[in-house]
Image: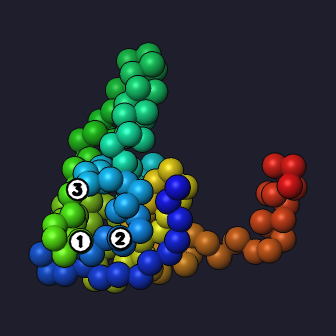
Amino acid sequence: MLIGEYAHTIDTKGRLIFPAKLRESLGEQFVLTKGFSDPCLYVYSMEEWGRIEERIKQLPMSRARELQRFLFSSAALAEADKQGRIVIPSALREYAGLKKDVMVVGAMVRAEIWDPDKWTESTEHLTPDYIASAMEELGF
């Protein structure tokens, strides 16, 4: 399970020290791609990426075509170097608006890489009342 919130920086070469705890869960090699509905990057283990591929293969081509283009054309394999750094391709950095400072967050089956201001904006509505209501819907 991918959990936690980590503040990091991207260097001038597009490298990010990826949190060790998340690397342990993701494995030696993992996939970076555009966030589906959020202005961030999604990070998947190879196993989870395989599940996504299989589910997309099950869709009719008329529905899968654009999803395949969006996800796979922008996807990049990442592998941490000895210092724990991964390279984030410039097109992905641009998509997510990543400059220097970033937030890397665990989101259960994936990690996400956010611009810190966008991360704050995206979580502002998560008040205790909102969370209590969502948990009640789930039967907690």
Amino acid type, mark 1: Gly
Q: Is residue 55 above or below residue 27?
A: above
In this view of the protein, can residue 25 be seen by the observer?
Answer: yes
Q: Earlier in the sequence, mark 3 or mark 1?
A: 3
Residue at the disc numbered 2: 20
The C terminus - image quarter: bottom right
Image colouring? rainbow
Please state the horizontal and vertical placement of residue 7, each as a whole percent of the image.
41, 82
The image position of residue 98, as x and y in percent, is 31, 73
Q: Earlier in the sequence, mark 2 or mark 1?
A: 2
Rendered location of residue 76, percent (x, y): 22, 50
How many angstroms separate mark 2 from mark 1 (CA)? 7 Å
Q: Which mark is residue 65?
A: none
Using the image as rendered, state which of residue 87 and residue 126 is in the foreground.
87
Q: Gap between marks 3 and 2, in whole Å?
A: 14 Å
Q: Pick out the residue farthest to the top.
A: 60
Which residue is at 45% across, 49% downward? Answer: 36
Pointers 2 and 1 in contact (CB under 8 A)?
A: yes
Query: Relative to 87, is 38 on the left or the right?
Result: right
* Residue at x-position 22% and y-position 56%: 78
* Residue in the foreground of this view, choosing between 100 and 48: 48
Picture quadrant of residue 43: bottom left
Circle 3: residue type: Ala
Q: Nearer the viewer, mark 3 or mark 2?
A: 2
The crowding category of the residue bearing disc 1, from other C-alpha atoms within 10 Å (few below 14, some 14 to 19, many at least 20), is some
Q: In the rendered image, which residue does mark 3 sit on?
A: 78
Residue type at mark 2 is: Ala
Left or right, 10 with respect to 2, comes to: left
**To which residue does mark 1 refer?**
84
Nearer-N-terminus badge (3/2)? 2
